[in-house]
């Protein structure tokens, strides 16, 4: 593409099932759906959650043009689709056609969204791991259902309630749930939209461990043996990676 083409909107075709970008990818463009349909996906446990489906004239990936270049979810074409690719040069060219005050307003709103999503957090008494696991145990006590392999709780409920209780974004909730699933503190079964807790005592002990490792260790309710403590040390290192 030569210099004269940099402000033209390119279109790209994606057959059904093809991934446009993966969660965690770095991107510098947004997409407008000219035709077809895409689905926004997040992998959870042994399966995936479809967070949203978008169709003609809708758009996605727009925050990449305002400083948040890391993709927060995977996007896949659910049917054959044609997308308009808008990069920063195209956006800047369009901004030149509208009043400056409108450009300032759009960029300010985008900046506020980024700040709200990333910069505002509550101060927790122990740490984020403790806060989220504690919230899960409280939700399990109120809404848990007995199953053969333990007790389960609705995954959507957990995601929404932790976002409200702990004061973090849904992306951050999913980030921590994946980590707890990885170390087998919880089991995410996305295909059935639930989380299974097979050993509640283990989670309670891990909560005690987190308090004992914190400056608030004098407030710990209960104790754990040395072998369990060392085992949780290894788990904590895995979670912290």
Image (cartoon, rainbow, N blue to C red):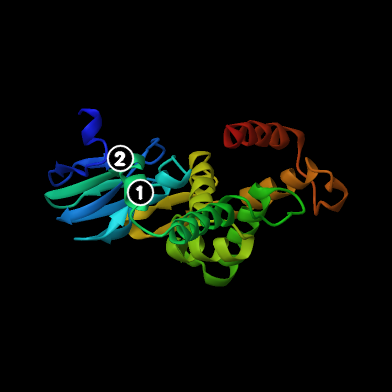
Give the residue displayed 19% in from the left and 56% down from the top.
Answer: 37
The quadrant in which the C terminus is found is top right
The quadrant in which the N terminus is found is top left
Q: In the shown orientation, is residue 31 left or right of residue 16?
A: right
Question: CA–CA distance between discs 1 and 2?
Answer: 10 Å
Q: Residue 33 appears in which quarter of the rendering? A: bottom left
Give the residue displayed 75% in from the left and 49% down from the top.
Answer: 126
Image coordinates of residue 47 in percent, x first then y, are 33, 48
Label number found at residue 134: none
- Tell which of 229 and 81 is nearer to you: 81
Q: In the shown orientation, is residue 55 left or right of residue 185?
A: left
* Dots 1, 2 in contact, CB < 8 A: yes
Instruction: Kindly state the secondary structure of the residue where label 1 is placed.
Output: loop
Q: How crowded is mark 2: few (under 14 residues within 10 Å), some or many (20 or more)?
A: some
Label number found at residue 61: 1
Q: Residue 7 appears in which quarter of the rendering? A: top left
Say whether disc 1 or disc 2 marks the residue closer to the N-terminus: 2
Q: In the shown orientation, is residue 164 left or right of residue 210?
A: left
Q: Is residue 202 above or below residue 168?
A: above
Image coordinates of residue 209 in percent, x first then y, are 73, 43
Question: Which mark lies nearer to you, 1 or 2?
Answer: 1
Q: Name the residue under label 2.
A: 21
Instruction: Kindly state the secondary structure of the residue where label 2 is placed.
Output: strand
Q: Which residue lies furthest to the bottom in this view?
A: 142
- Tell which of 52 and 160 is nearer to you: 52
Q: In this view, does 223 lie above or below 159?
A: above
Q: In this view, does 10 lie above or below 32?
A: above
Image coordinates of residue 194 in percent, x first then y, are 42, 59
- Tell which of 33 and 152 is nearer to you: 33
Q: Residue furthest top?
A: 2
């Amino acid at each position: 593409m030569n210099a004269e083409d940099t402000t033209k909107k390119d279109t790209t075709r994606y057959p059904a099932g093809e991934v446009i970008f993966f969660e965690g990818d770095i991107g510098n463009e947004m997409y407008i759906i000219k035709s077809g349909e895409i689905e926004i996906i997040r992998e959870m446990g042994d399966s995936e959650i479809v967070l949203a489906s978008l169709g003609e004239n809708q758009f996605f990936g727009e925050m990449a043009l305002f400083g948040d270049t890391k993709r927060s979810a995977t996007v896949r074409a659910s049917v054959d689709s044609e997308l308009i690719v808008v990069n920063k040069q195209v956006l800047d060219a369009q901004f030149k056609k509208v009043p400056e005050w409108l450009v300032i307003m759009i960029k300010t709103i985008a900046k506020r969204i980024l700040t709200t999503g990333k910069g505002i957090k509550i101060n927790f008494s122990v740490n984020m791991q403790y806060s989220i696991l504690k919230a899960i145990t409280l939700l399990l006590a109120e809404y848990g259902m007995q199953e053969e392999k333990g007790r389960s709780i609705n995954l959507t409920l957990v995601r929404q309630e932790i976002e409200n209780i702990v004061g973090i974004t849904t992306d951050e909730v999913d980030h921590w749930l994946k980590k707890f699933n990885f170390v087998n503190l919880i089991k995410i079964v996305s295909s059935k939209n639930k989380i299974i807790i097979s050993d509640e005592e283990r989670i309670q002990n891990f909560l005690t461990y987190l308090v004992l490792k914190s400056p608030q260790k004098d407030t710990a309710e209960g104790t754990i043996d040395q072998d369990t403590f060392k085992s949780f040390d290894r788990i904590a290192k895995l979670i912290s990676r």
